[in-house]
Structures are given as structure tokens and as C-alpha cells.
Image (spheres, grey):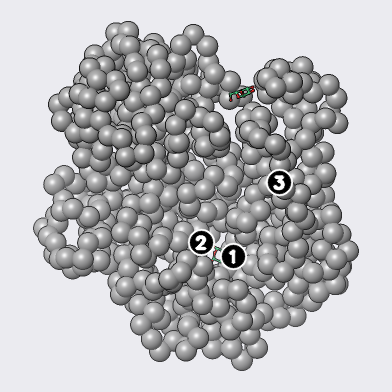
Amino acid sequence: MKPDRIHFGADYNPEQWPPEVWREDVRLMREAGVTIVTLGIFSWASVEPEPGRHDFSWLDEVMDLLGDAGIAVSLATGTASPPAWLSRLHPQTLPVTREGVRLSPGSRQHYCPSSPVYRQAAAGLAAELGKRYGGHPALALWHVGNEYGCHVQECYCDVSAEDFRAWLRERYGDLDTLNAAWSTTFWSQRLGDWAEVLPPRAAPTLRNPAQELDYRRFSSDALLACYRAEREVLRELTPDVPITTNIMGMWEPVADYASWAPDFDVVALDLYPEPKDPRAHIDAAFFHDQMRSLGGGRPYLMMETATSAISYRPPNRPKRPGLNRLWSHQAVARGADAVMYFQWRASRGGAEKFHSAVVSHGGADNRIFREVRALGAELAGLARVAGTRVPADVALVHDYANWWSLELDARPGELRIPERVRAHYTPLWQENVTVDVVPPEADLSGYKLVVVPNLYLCTDAAAAGLRRYVEGGGHLLMSFFSGIADACDRVRPGGHPGAFRDLLGLRVEEFWPLGEGERVTLTGGGGADLWADHLVPEGAEVLARYADGPLEGEPAITRHAFGAGLATYLGTRPDEATMRALTREALRLAGAEPVLAGLPDQVEAVRRGPRLFLLNHSDRPVRAAGVELGPLDVAVLEDSRAGGATEGGA
Ligand code: GLA
Ligand code: GLA
């Protein structure tokens, strides 16, 4: 895929329609400015109706129709929903839940990620598709599977158990090391034989947290192995065609996407912001930043989004006029080189028939289609943005192992990563500062400020990296309950936070989680809730204390000069206004500039390549950077800082 345009398109499922409709589809696609479609995402049963017997007749015809119309194809391998015959002939490919229930076919993604039978059958289908269409002029991209782990993230069957043992042998080598890693002396869990090693199946009470954590890691790797099995086959057959799978922008730790990223030729995002949610665009901005960062700053594809309503979140509210345009531009502003929808034509039957599409049940003579068509024309004018980058001075550290472990049972307080990440990301968004989302082991040297929400679990490498970063002059903003556990979820000895005591210049003596509705006041103004560290400064300067509550008079927020840098620590959860003030101060000290200062509330500004994007997420007209923006309006300006670009723009 050449970065010569912002691609525009949709999932296209022509097997649900007779051939006359295909011709009408292609005509409407051209009218809407469609440049690419993802074809055959759930076509396994249509192209392989019986084991080993392939019927490509319909796909041949559709590939040619699209190719002749100049529409590129992201060809799906169709392996996310195995055909009925696979489940009938090989019931052991069906996944088993934690409670021991074997799931049935009749929906989708009904396969055990560790199943060699499934993996082989899927790779076999990918090979057939590779042989048949590898040389087709319309083929632009391979789309492997679909949303790995969206419904089945883990399987607890015996095949998975065996695969887990192999994974653990690889990671730990022998049982003594595994026993130490899992702290199995606690509750007499010592493992004396590999046969005793099991997935964390339903058990009487709290399970071993290290076993739980490793099962999440293993399951992420098992899903990745499914992707890789197909990728290898396709790479061999078509070395020049890029390969990807679509991952999900959502607040669930489905898989460790940071570890998957090197296997994507281009990152592909599925994003369904909720039209009813007044802060959906801030979450969306976060996921865009995450996807761009996963690809090391390279452009990614927004592979799926909705033109309007999403069918599984009742009430299924449509997007108001202008919202699709606004959110699509937000994707492009933050680094996407494609805007694509699920799906092209609304299905007549099936589970998602009330999900919005480009062509509705009533056809194309309606608002949704007209808006899509207008957007297609606008995106065609943004060709100069394609392939360009989005600069960011600030990094936010986000880690899946931390997410998995922090939310396990029996922690001192009920911390949830989505809330914790949002609390740190929102003020950065409000200040119009562009953020990269990076794993804790990333090279941080290029950033002026690094924000670390609640990094409870932290590897030695990450601890050393963060230390080096501040020592070398970096600025850090870190929240409570960070640096407590090692990679095996064992508490770091020698006083909390074991990984960061010297860096932060303090010791946390006790955790004082606050009760539901319990608020404390901070000296200097503002309040806090959820959590209070009882901390003892060991060199850190106290910025604020608890003015009341169980730790009245004790330090709550500190700052420590460490090496050439500065580390600010929040021992509690400040309210939104206080968090914003603290973030603004951290940005100022670090010298991190907003894209544009002094913008009206709910106006987002992003620089990308030669352009400056202004996005008005509010319902009122505003004036920003000398431009009038209506409600939900967008302006794409020449970026004077980028220098010299003149053409294109919306
Ligand atoms: C019970 C058990 C202990 C310990 C405590 C604290 O008393 O007997 O082993 O688990 O609860 O949870
Ligand atoms: C996901 C899937 C699509 C469709 C959409 C809408 O993104 O990949 O197949 O199910 O959700 O629900």
C-alpha cells in the first residue's frame, strides 16, 4: 500500500448478496470515493464448504469487479469463524471456559487458540487464498483472522493446558524456577511434576496470582501464534504484500498488543466510540495515539468504525450529523492513513443486521450515505497527509502485564486501569498536548515528560529505564501503587515502592485506600479520593499534604530532583481540576508545549505532517486559530510550523 492517499472503504461481505447487488455495490463505492475494501472477513464456509474442497467462483468474480473499478482489496483469510464442519469433525477445536463449559458453534470465534487442528486448517485456507490471489492486481493487503481474542481470549481445555506447560518450560526452564516464580510455597501449591501444572481453572477461592498472570501472557501468545501461523504461509507465497490483523481500541486487556506490534506490517485499528458517551472522543484520541505508537510512529489504518449506530449497545443511538466526519478526521489527524467501516452494506439477516453500514437497508438515498460520500471527497483532498507523522513530546506508559495483574483480586484498593489511564490522559488531551502511548521498557530519551499511571507491576528493565530517563534529565509524573511488584507479581522487598524509592526520594509505609465516597482535602486546594499513601519523604520535597482524613498532616504529593531530572509523585487520586493543574505544572517544568495554547474547551488540535487539524467536539460554534468552526466541525489548515505546504486540505 503506497502512502499516496488517505484510504477510504469498508468491510465488504458480498457472499450475503446475489451478483446483481455486487455491480450496484461497486457503482456506489465509486460514487462514495471508496479506495479499498476488506473482503471475505467471514468467508471460510463459503470458500471451503467441505474440508479441502474450495469454491472460489464468487470471490474470483468480486476480486475482478473491484480490480476493474480501481478499488484495492484488503483480502481477509476468513479464519475468525470456523465452518460448521470443523466443529463437527473436530469438536476438540471448540474452546472451554474457566468453569469447564465447552462452547458451541453458532456465533463466531469458536476455536481454541492452542488447537493445532484449528491452526493447521486456518493456515491451509490462507495458503489456498495466497496461491489463488497472490498475483491479483487488486490485492493490496492481507487481513489475517479478525479481532483476535474479541470473544474468546483464553481457553482452559486440556490441549491448552499442554500448550501452557510448553510455554512455561520455555519461560522458566525447570519446575524449581517455576515454583519460585509462582510463590507456590504459599497455600501448599508446590508443583512436583509438570502434569500438575494447570490453567487457572475454577477453584475454591483466590487463585495464585502469578499463575493467573502467566495464563494471560500465555493466552496472548497463543492468539499471536494463530496469527503467525497464517502470516508465515502468506509471507512465503507473497513476500511483497503487507500483512496485518485488526486489533481493538477498547478498555479491555485482550492481548499484549505491544508484543504483537513487530508482527504487523501496518497496525490496523477497530474503533467504536460510543455516540452516547460525552467523552468518547477523548478515549478515541487515546486509542489513536496508542495505535500510532505501536507502529513506532508510522501511520496505521482505522480498519473498522461505524458510520452510525452500533448494534450491541442498546439503545443503539445513531451518530448525529457531522459526528462521523469529525471522528474520521480525528483518526487521520492522529496518524491513520485509512478510514474504513464495518460494514459496506447492512445485512438482512444475522446477529448484526441493525449495525449501521454505508449502504443501509433502505439503500443509499439517505443521510448516512450522503455524509459518507462527502467525507470520501474530503479525504481524497488530504493526500499530502498520507504517510506523514505526528510529533509528540510526552509519553504515557501503558502496560498489559500491569493491567492484568493490577486488576486481580485481593489488592489493597480497587484500581481499574481504564479509569487510571483516563485520569492521566484527559488533562493532557485538555491541554492539547500530543501523547505517545508506550510500554514501560520503551526508549524514553526523546520525551520531555513521561507520565506513569499506577505501574504496580514493573520489570527490572523498566525500572532501570525509568531511572535512567530521569537521571539523564527527564521529567516524570507517577501515580501511587507503582513499582510494588516484580514481573512475577512478587512484592519487591526493602520497602515500597521497591522499584522507585531512590528515584522518587520517598518510602511508602502503608497504603490507605479510601472508602466509597470518602474524600480528603489537600493543602493548597483541591481534594482527592480512592487512595492515600502514607509516605515518608527521603529527599523528596512535599508539594501538598492531606488536610484532613485518616492521614491528616502527612505528605500526599511530592517532587524529587534525581540526577538531572525531576520526578513528581501523586500518593493519592486528585480530583479532576487538581489533576489538570498538576499536569499543567509538570508540562511547564518539562518544557512540553501544547499544539496550540488557549483553545476553547472541547477543541482538539493536532499537527500531522504539513497540516494542522482543528476538531470542535462541542455543540457550539467556536473560533480557534483564527478560524470559525461550527458545532462538530473540522478545519484542516496548513501548518505554518511544518513549512511550505500548500495543496490539499479540507
Ligand atoms: C483465614 C485463613 C487464613 C487466611 C486468613 C486471611 O483466617 O484461615 O489462612 O487466609 O483467613 O484471609
Ligand atoms: C467488530 C468486528 C466486526 C463487527 C463489528 C461491529 O469490530 O470485527 O466484524 O462485528 O465489530 O460489531
Q: Where is residue 204 in the image (x, y as percent from the top left)?
A: 70, 36
Residue carrying label 3:
98
Q: Is residue 613 above or below residue 431?
A: below
Residue carrying label 1:
74
Q: Where is residue 36 in the image (x, y as percent from the top left)?
A: 52, 69
Specify few, some or many for label 3: CA neighbours under 10 Å numbering under 14, 14-19, or 20 or more.
Answer: some
Residue at x-position 71% and y-position 46%: 98
Q: In which quarter of the image is the C terminus?
A: bottom left
Amino acid type at image mark 3: Arg
Q: Quadrant of the rendered structure where residue 507 is? A: top left
Q: In this view, does 500 lie above or below 320?
A: above
Residue 465 showing in the rendered view: no
The earlier-in-sequence mark between 3 and 1 is 1
Distance CA(mark 3)–CA(mark 2): 31 Å
Q: Are circles 2 and 1 on residues that touch, CB within 8 Å?
A: yes
Q: Quadrant of the rendered structure where residue 331 is? A: bottom left
Amino acid type at image mark 2: Met
Amino acid type at image mark 1: Ser
Q: Are circles 3 and 2 on residues that touch, CB within 8 Å?
A: no
Rendered-image quarter of ligand 1: top right
Disc 3, SS: loop
Disc 1, SS: strand
Q: Nearer the viewer, residue 565 or 535?
A: 535
Disc 2, SS: strand
Residue 189 showing in the rendered view: yes
